[in-house]
C-alpha cells in the first residue's frame, strides 16, 4: 500500500473492513470470497447490479450488504 494513501473503512453486512483507496466492489467481493453469480449487492441501501461492481469504487463509510437473491412469488 502507498504510504501516503490511507485505507478507508467500509462495513460489509455490519462487519468493518479496511480497504485500499481505489478498491472496487468487485475487488472486495473477490477478497472476501463471495461468488459473484450467487450474491446480490447494495451500497448504502442502493442495489448495485453485477455489471457495475467493477466500476463502483468504494468510499469511506460505505455500508455494503451482500445477500442471496430470492426469486419466486
Image (cartoon, helix red, strand yellow):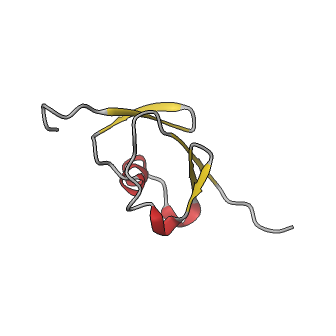
Quadrant of the drawing holding the N terminus = top left
Please say if 4 is above or below 71.
Answer: above
Q: Residue at x 12, y 31 (%)?
A: 3
Quadrant of the drawing holding the C terminus = bottom right
Q: Is residue 5 left or right of residue 26?
A: left
Please say if 72 is above or below 12.
Answer: below
Q: Is residue 34 left or right of residue 38?
A: left
Q: Is residue 59 left or right of residue 41?
A: left
Farthest residue, direction left: 3
Residue nearer the viewer, 29 or 61: 61
The quarter of the picture where residue 30 lies is bottom left
Where residue 36 sits: x, y (%)? 49, 63
Where residue 68 sits: x, y (%)? 65, 56
Residue nearer the viewer, 64 or 67: 64
The quarter of the picture where residue 60 lies is top left
Farthest residue, direction right: 73
Q: Residue at x 28, y 42 (%)?
A: 21
Amino acid at each position: 500500500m502507498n504510504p501516503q494513501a490511507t485505507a478507508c473503512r467500509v462495513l460489509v453486512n455490519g462487519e468493518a473492513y479496511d480497504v485500499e483507496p481505489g478498491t472496487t466492489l468487485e475487488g472486495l467481493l473477490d477478497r472476501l470470497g463471495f461468488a459473484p453469480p450467487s450474491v446480490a449487492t447494495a451500497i448504502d441501501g442502493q442495489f448495485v447490479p453485477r455489471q457495475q461492481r467493477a466500476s463502483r469504487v468504494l468510499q469511506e463509510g460505505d455500508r455494503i450488504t451482500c445477500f442471496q437473491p430470492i426469486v419466486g412469488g
